[in-house]
Image (cartoon, rainbow, N blue to C red):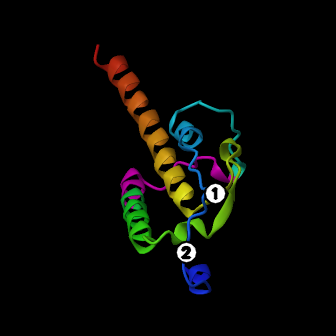
Amino acid sequence: MEISKSTNAVFVPNNYYLDWEKLKTIGEHRSFEWNRPEHMKPKGEPSLIEIQERLEKHFHECLNHLAFIKNDEGVLYKTMMSVNNLGKIDVYHYIYFLVQHSKRHLSQMQKIKIEFNELYDR
């Protein structure tokens, strides 16, 4: 939003492209090779309830951000994303990345739940 204040109007470039396919792979478990950095290694905390609360909070924050940048301001700021060699992505790409990343974790948890139920429902 700070960047948009210094311009009269925000225009989406003619060559603007959302690489949906490359971002979709973020939501698929083991769809690309990526070695997790040490600081992202699970430590067994916080609690499951705290994680659920954080995810819900983050979801609503993303919705609020999208509502706030409804006039294409999201194309003005880019950040580097090393995951799946995405490179520089704008705010809209980043929010979609977060959605796909959450989707991957949800599918992993669903798979674990199914495996657990098959193991103990005998």
Q: Is-magenta flag for residue 90?
A: no
Q: Residue at x 59, y 30 (%)?
A: 30
Q: Position of residue 42 (x, y in %)?
A: 58, 47
* Residue where numbered disc 1 is placed: 89
6 lies above or below 26: below
* Residue where numbered disc 2 is placed: 10
Q: Quadrant of residue 89?
A: bottom right
Q: Amino acid at mark 2?
A: Val
The disc label shown at residue 113, or none: none
113 lies above or below 43: above
The local crowd at label 2, few if under 14, some if 14 to 19, many if 20 or more residues have their Cα within 10 Å, is: some
**Foreground pick, 83 / 36:** 83
Element under disc 2? loop
Q: Earlier in the sequence, mark 1 or mark 2?
A: 2
The local crowd at label 1, few if under 14, some if 14 to 19, many if 20 or more residues have their Cα within 10 Å, is: some
Residues in magenta? 39-53
Answer with left or right where residue 35 lies relative to residue 121. Answer: right
Q: Position of residue 117 (x, y in %)?
A: 32, 23
